[in-house]
Image (cartoon, grey):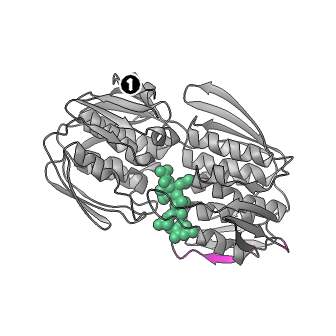
Amino acid sequence: MDKLLVYGQQKLMGKIPISGAKNAALPLFAASLLTSEVLTLHNVPPLSDIATMAELLTCLGTHYKSDNLSRDEMTVHLQADHVENLVAKYELVKKMRASILVLGPLLARYGHCRVSAPGGCAIGVRPIDLHLKGLEAMGAVFELQDGYIDAKAPHGLNGAVFEFPIVTVTGTENLLMAATLANGTTTLINAAQEPEIVDLAECLISMGAEISGHGTSTITIKGCGELHGATHKIISDRIEAGTYALAAGISGGDVELVGENLSSLLPTFLETISRIGLDVTPTEAGLRVRSTGSLQPIDITTAAFPGFPTDLQAQTMAILCLANGVSNIWENIWENRFIHVAELHRMGANITVSGAHAQIKGVQQLTGAQVMATDLRASFSLVLAALSAKGETLIDRIYHLDRGYCNVTEKLADCGVCVQRVRG
Ligand code: EPU
């Protein structure tokens, strides 16, 4: 397993190109199953999760072609004109839970499919009951057999009114995609409002779907008989942008994040890091984020968009470890998303966790150590801590990092920071 060696006390100075959003790309790949024509996606990030989704679609029978436009960006052509195998197998679903995104499109287009039930993962139990309840409201029937969800829509899917009891991002995406091919109109109430949902809806509209209200909590979809091919450019990855903003802040650096609409993608986060003491200014190409020397403590509660994103919680905790006082974080989305705390302790952090609450007492200095990445976002929190620390840090299990951050060593090197991938 590869490791990452990070030399401490290095400042990020320069420009970071922000890649396309992983969590927008994954549902967009699944949306290709809704038509027999070609869906072309620009600004696809070269990540291992994207490769897993491509493998899943290929196993189903989709034609997949990718052109590497640059180090950080691919254009991908997907054509689901010969889907014969309607089974999403365990080996792929267990690798990446977002595989569940093929359920809605397959059911809507073919009337049946078999998708491995995704298990839990490090950050939480991660049920999919709301995906299933929503599709049931549209006429689907599910049976669990041998760890697989056998899905059928004997009379096709029909439009329905479905209210999510809690906001779910991929749940909203699954129903949104399924509803585009259903008979009649579907209304999704208490739908997720994340920018990735808006991006998916925009792409579906360019494929011929009739959708309104995306970006608000009520989405209306008028089902139509079929969708056609389209070309779509994926939005910038707001979580990658936020992560590198924190890298500038924790290292005492000054970076320009180059990407589109970053301010509107990260409203609460940018306001929060300004209160921590980072200077954030919009530029023509994106955002400039600069350390002002001191870090202030702050209280954060994670929430669905437009609230503070859970996917930036671990990384923000790393910077708060060095703030001048006591900070508090309440993690409201995932029940087990403080696993990085034990690793930050090994680097000298002073954090106390009680249930969904973490109290972080700022320390003067973190120190390098051997640590282990436990999930995707947690792994970058360790990179951030390591950048500020005294001495070297060796981070094990960085396959987690590769799932969602592309070309980390190269992007950091562009900003004058040396980290080394140790093959193993
Ligand atoms: N939930 C249910 N039942 C469901 C679905 C969700 O109880 O049927 C609960 C979950 O247990 C959780 C909450 O609802 O407590 C929100 O979960 P959600 O369904 O929104 O999460 P997700 O769609 O599985 C996406 C992102 C995650 C991100 C969350 C929250 C993708 C592929 N994944 O997951 O991203 O943390 O939304 O914003 O879009 C990451 O990129 O590191 C990552 C984990």
| Magenta-colored span | 154-165
Residue 227, percent across and down?
A: 81, 54
What kind of element bears circle 1? strand
Q: Quadrant of residue 301?
A: bottom left
Please tell me which residue is depicted at 64% across the width and 58% down the height of the picture: 100
Q: Is residue 310 found inside the magenta-colored segment of the image?
A: no
Label 1 CB, ligand 1: below 8 Å? Answer: no
Q: Amino acid at mark 1?
A: Gln
Residue situated in front as seen by the camera: 141 or 406? 141
Please tell me which residue is depicted at 39% across the width and 61% down the height of the picture: 336
In the visual, does 272 lie left or right of 259?
A: left
- Would you place residue 226 above or below residue 138 in this image? above
Residue 289, percent across and down?
A: 33, 37
- Would you place residue 423 above or below residue 314 in this image? above
Circle 1 Cα neighbour tier, 10 Å, few/some/many (<14 / 14–19 / ≥20):
some
Residue corresponding to mark 1: 420
Residue situated in front as seen by the camera: 160 or 100? 100
In the visual, does 282 lie left or right of 367?
A: right
Residue 99, percent across and down?
A: 64, 54
Whether residue 207 is visible to the viewer of this picture, yes or no, is no
In the visual, does 352 lie left or right of 181?
A: left
Residue 308, percent across and down?
A: 38, 57
Magenta span: predominant SS is loop
Whether residue 90 is visible to the viewer of this picture, yes or no, is yes
Quarter of the image with the C terminus is: top left
Q: Is residue 163 found inside the magenta-colored segment of the image?
A: yes
